[in-house]
Image (cartoon, helix red, strand yellow):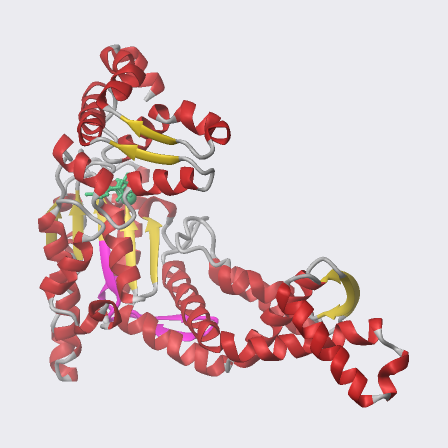
Amino acid sequence: MDNEQKKLDDMLPREIVEQLDKYIIGQEDAKKLIAIAIRNRVRRKRLPEDMKAEVTPKNIIMMGPTGVGKTEIARRIAKLANAPFIKVEATKYTEVGYVGRDVESMVKDLMASSVSLVKAEMFKENEKKVETVVEEKLLDLLIPAIDEEKKAQDVQVQDVRESMRQLLRSGALDDKEVEMAVPQSVRVSGVGVFGAPQDASGVDIGNIFEDLNSMFQNSGREKKRKITVKRAREIIREDQLNKSVDNDKVIDEAKARCEEMGIIFIDEIDKIANKGQTNNQDVSREGVQRDILPIVEGTKVSTKWGVVDTTNILFIAAGAFSVAKPSDLIPELQGRFPLRVELHDLTSDDFYRILTEPDNAIVKQYKALLKTEGVDLSFTDDALRHIAEIAEKANNSADNIGARRLHTVMERLLEDLSFNAADKKGESVEITADYVDKALSGIVEDQDLTRYIL
Ligand SMILES: Nc1ncnc2c1ncn2[C@@H]1O[C@H](COP(=O)(O)OP(=O)(O)OP(=O)(O)O)[C@@H](O)[C@H]1O
Ligand SMILES: [Mg+2]
């Protein structure tokens, strides 16, 4: 796909919206505005330095009820861009000087996410190259154990090696045990590279990285252990992958990516907005807003990978804003979030489309899940319409949880089938409107049941 190759920054707003359409139903205004915000960042970056300083970043506030796509839009935009992305909750932060997380940690987390992103990309690039080395190393481990005496006779050793290679490739040796020295770096870096959470709510990834790094720098010792070939392959592969990348290059690239393309999604921004009263809690909320301000405006934050400039980072704030309004934020902060958009409640028509249309649509997911058990699941169009209506009804009579309602409804609908799937191997199951009716109608009619069961 051409668009997928394209860097987000090269994409026209229209193209960005097209990409988002694959995952998010409706919410056209929000998609459009996000596309504009991304484009504005590009435009601003192209300005001469002195003028750039004058133009404030055009960050966004998304307002809307729960479960209508606020986070999903931001997450998709980041994926699309291969951009470092983190989601934080405004309520997790405390003013500098108080116990809690200080706001600079969001930039550290973003940088951590950028490092994992870049590293994973480079690993991917090197995967093939490393695989040959891994195989040779595994053979080195395997052969002396099996063929100690024949080592001298070269030709035979080569033969053994080749047949061993075939065995290895076939997977026949996967469970065989070998003894090998496990490099400490492997056990540690595995966590660092792939384990860095994208949604770092509450965990300071920066610190974890620090701890891990010092752990493996201090411990050069290698311990010999008996492990399976399968595990040995993983360990050697990871060790080789780590050796295959130049750390300085990773950090340079990660820093550039973080500064130029990073997106920080601040959820629950409405919860730190003041609403007139000034008790102690409000004062500290305002403090948090004041702390966030310079980061949004552009400041330098030192991380363990060096100083990160936040000037071009895009901030997307979101909240329900059912009580507080954007105008309850301190004026300076309001000014940094000039783009505002409201997301709408989803209707049963939206639900119908959400069930089927997106690339990762819920119905597709359930079909795939049951396929793994040999069950062919299908839905009639009527059934899907009916499910969508039930979801809307349930949202009206119990809490409105937006599209998340579809999950609870589907789980309930397919509960029996999920439970008995193994007995239905090889069968096709069609969900009809009638089936939906039988399974769910009673629940939807009874308000109390809806509340507790759906
Ligand atoms: N418009 C939509 N199109 C497709 N899927 C959607 C849409 N809105 C929500 N969803 C799905 O519903 C789930 C919840 O959505 P999301 O996380 O975006 O909610 P939110 O608006 O951020 O709510 P909250 O205020 O609770 O954080 C996700 O799985 C998402 O894929
Ligand atoms: Mg959300």
The one of 161 and 238 positioned closer to us in this rendering: 161
The one of 443 and 33 positioned closer to us in this rendering: 443
The one of 123 and 169 positioned closer to us in this rendering: 169
Location of residue 206 in the rendering, given as x and y in whole percent from the top left corner: 48, 63
Q: Is residue 53 above or below residue 99?
A: below
The count of marks equals 0
The image quadrant that residue 401 belongs to is top left
Res 338 visible: no
Rendering quadrant holding ligand 2? top left
Q: In this view, does 81 lie above or below 195?
A: below
Res 268 visible: yes
Location of residue 336 in the rendering, given as x and y in whole percent from the top left corner: 16, 60
Quarter occupied by the C terminus? top left
The answer to whether residue 385 is left or right of residue 134 is: left
Residue at the extreme right of the image, as rendered: 149
306 falls in the magenta region: yes
Location of residue 227 in the rendering, given as x and y in whole percent from the top left corner: 75, 61
23 falls in the magenta region: no
Quarter occupied by the N terminus? bottom left
Q: Give the range drawn in magenta.
A: 296-316
Q: Which residue is drawn at 23% across and 47% down?
A: 358
Q: Which residue is drawn at 71% across and 71% down?
A: 219
The answer to whether residue 113 is left or right of residue 430 is: right
The one of 29 and 353 positioned closer to us in this rendering: 353
Location of residue 269 in the rendering, given as x and y in whole percent from the top left corner: 25, 46
Q: Which residue is drawn at 22% across and 30% down?
A: 380
The answer to whether residue 202 is left or right of residue 397 is: right
